[in-house]
Amino acid sequence: MDDAFLRLLAGRSDDPGLLEATVRAARGKSDLVAALPEEETRRHTRALVRGVLAALRDGGPGPEVLAAAERLGSDRARQGVPVAAFLDGFQAGRAHLVRALVEEGRRTGVPAEVLLEGVTRIDEITSALVHRMVHAHRGAELEMARTVRDARQQALRLLLHGEPVPGGAPLDPAGSYHCVVSDVSDPAVASRLETALTAAGPALCGLVDGRLAALLARLPDLPADVPLLVAAPAVPPARVGAQYGLARRALRAGTAAGLTGLRPLAGLALLTATEAEPELGRLLAAELLPGLDAADAFHRELAETALAYLDHGGRVDVTARALHVHANTVKYRLRRLREITGRPLPAGGDAVAGAAHWWWALRTHLGAGAADRT
């Protein structure tokens, strides 16, 4: 660096007027920086102005100057100032510093080529400082996001396990929230689902026990082909622990049944209860379906038709549409099932309990057939 430019720097490195003018330039360019206490801006500006001038004398920014740049980036992230806003302020301060040095150099007769070299070196130094500031800002943002996310996920885990949350849960204790569970463990799939789940309103969402779970103020509209999600009725945060275990049981039953989409817990009540008592299901299958062979393809077709008939409220026309067959085909299969088992499907006063028993028996029978084929 030319001696003339170094003498120019020596006269301005501790100039309070240069510092204050640079502070005003930085605050005037960025509203978010201007919203900070003035002394906060002055503290960082003082360190960076002195650092840049020292770097010009020393041939490059030293550890202290780089550390000051990192502190600025990190502090602005923690103060909620976006990287673009604080860079606007920094660049405005840099521009003022360069103008002031050039004007002083011209006034004191520093050759133009010397000033050009000096300005070029300032740009090189400030570019290195900007890199450090941006890197520190992003690092602080990631750390804060990770800290907040970890705290919220820990709160979700404690709530679902029925344990107290230190400092209180980050949810309205007077509000009501749906406990939603899934078997999704892939982080990429979980991230996409989390975005969809939390779009509807206040929520806690994350991986609990290795699977995506959430507490939602409102349930979102989701396509039918998303992985199975079981949603319990909305209750206050203090009561979600009891529903988590029940929803997990319903999830296991629904998964075994091949279900997808967002399903209400109440709608899976019978499936959940029957899934928990497989021996009773086998007893009912033996009692109600004698002569029906789970390995026989035609017998399976009869059982599938009967199960669809029960699932569709005992309506032949609706069952036929669901199975893509003619209504007479449904009637024929139901008749053949009655001939083979010696029992008609339930009707009359015993329709509710009888239909449930037949539904359970048919599901067990079909499940046994599927197991035999694997």
Image: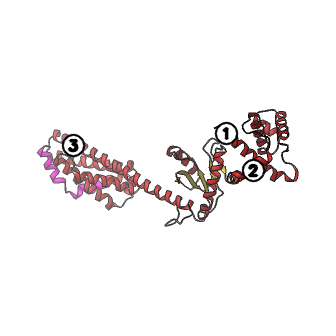
Earlier in the chain: of badge 2 and badge 3, it is 3
- Asked if 336 appears above or below 264 in the picture, the reply is above
* Depth check, front residue: 330 or 297: 297
The residue beneath circle 2 is 283
The kind of residue on which mark 2 rests is: Leu
Q: How is the image coloured?
A: secondary structure
| Residues at marks 2 and 3, CA–CA distance in whole angstroms | 87 Å
Residue drawn at (13%, 49%) of the image: 7
Between 75 and 319, the residue placed more toward the observer is: 319
Mark in front: 3 vs 1: 1
- Disc 3 target residue: 121
Q: Nearer the viewer, residue 289 or 157?
A: 289
Q: Left or right: where does residue 59 sit relative to residue 29?
A: left
- Can residue 29 be seen here? The reply is no
Quadrant where the image shows the N terminus = top left
Q: Residue furthest left?
A: 3
Q: Position of residue 49 (x, y in %)?
A: 24, 53
Q: Residues within 10 Å of mark 3 (few under 14, many from 20)?
A: some
Which quarter of the figure is the C terminus placed in? top right
Q: Secondary structure at mark 1?
A: helix
Q: Earlier in the sequence, mark 3 or mark 1?
A: 3
Q: Residue at x 52, y 51 (%)?
A: 210
Q: Could you tell me the amino acid type at mark 3?
A: Arg
119 inside magenta stretch: no
Q: Which residue, given by chain and number where applicable, does mark 1 sit on? A: 372
What range is drawn magenta here? 1-25
Is residue 88 found left or right of 320 in the rendered image?
Answer: left
In the drawing, does residue 190 fall left or right of residue 82?
Answer: right
Q: Magenta stretch: dominant SS?
A: helix
Question: Residue 224 at x, y = what percent?
Answer: 65, 42
